Image: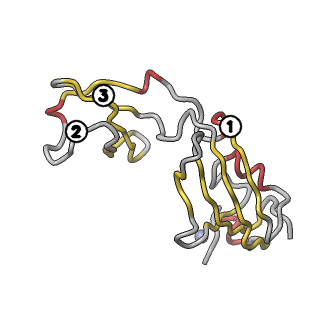
Amino acid sequence: MKIGQDTAVTIHYTLKGPDGQILDSSLDREPLTYLHGHRQIIFGLEQRLEGAEAGAQLDIHVPAAEAYGPRHQDLVFPVRRRQFDPEVALEPGVQVVTQGEEGPLVLTIVGVEGDTVLLDANHPLAGMDLDFSVQVVSVRAATPAEIAHGHVHA
Ligand SMILES: [Zn+2]
């Protein structure tokens, strides 16, 4: 069966960034199962998996615009040091979670100068072209309940 709208798809994947560094991989854990055509995975990857069958091994390049979008410099903003929990190590690269209007928001510390901490609300992968190595483990038709719910059942 080919991957298409309303199929339940199981894949193993390795994600590499622009310098070839491995950013994420399912190979050391359970494979990822998702409902195809429901935007559960990044759109550029979902589109390029269309038509593949179980056993396929694919190298898929997704430009930033079809992954996490461009970086927006205006999403980098300064915050006073005293607004942080004193437990948090205020160092570049540290991620802090705050409550946004639409749920939790992950912010990355990108700089610390004196009393000022620079936060970046961009997705950590924004602005990056992504390279996926994907192994299609299985493909089956989703059940009517899965399609209605918009997710795969175990
Ligand atoms: Zn359900």
Mark 2 residue crowding within 10 angstroms, few (<14) / some (14–19) / many (20+): some
- Please tell me whether residue 80 is drawn above or below residue 21 in the rendered image: above
Number of the label disc, if any, that sits on residue 90: 2
Disc 1 Cβ-to-ligand 1 distance below 8 Å:
no
Disc 3 Cβ-to-ligand 1 distance below 8 Å:
no
Residue closest to the eye, 117 or 28: 28
Q: Earlier in the sequence, mark 2 or mark 1?
A: 1
- Give the side of residue 56 with respect to residue 34, left or right: right
Mark 3 residue crowding within 10 angstroms, few (<14) / some (14–19) / many (20+): many
- Please name the amino acid that badge 3 sits on: Leu
The x, y position of residue 151, in whole percent, is 63, 65
Element carrying mark 1: loop
Rounded to the nearest angstrom, the CA distance separating label 2 from label 3 is: 10 Å
Number of the label disc, if any, that sits on residue 118: 3
Examine the rendering and report whether any part of residue 149 can be seen: no
Residue closest to the eye, 69 or 7: 69
Task: Specify the quadrant of the image occupied by residue 85.
Answer: top left
The x, y position of residue 150, in whole percent, is 65, 61
* Displayed-image quarter of ligand 1: bottom right
Which residue occupies 36% across, 39% down? Answer: 107
Mark 1 residue crowding within 10 angstroms, few (<14) / some (14–19) / many (20+): some
Rounded to the nearest angstrom, the CA distance separating label 2 from label 1 is: 32 Å
Q: Which residue is mark 1?
A: 63
- Please name the amino acid that badge 2 sits on: Leu
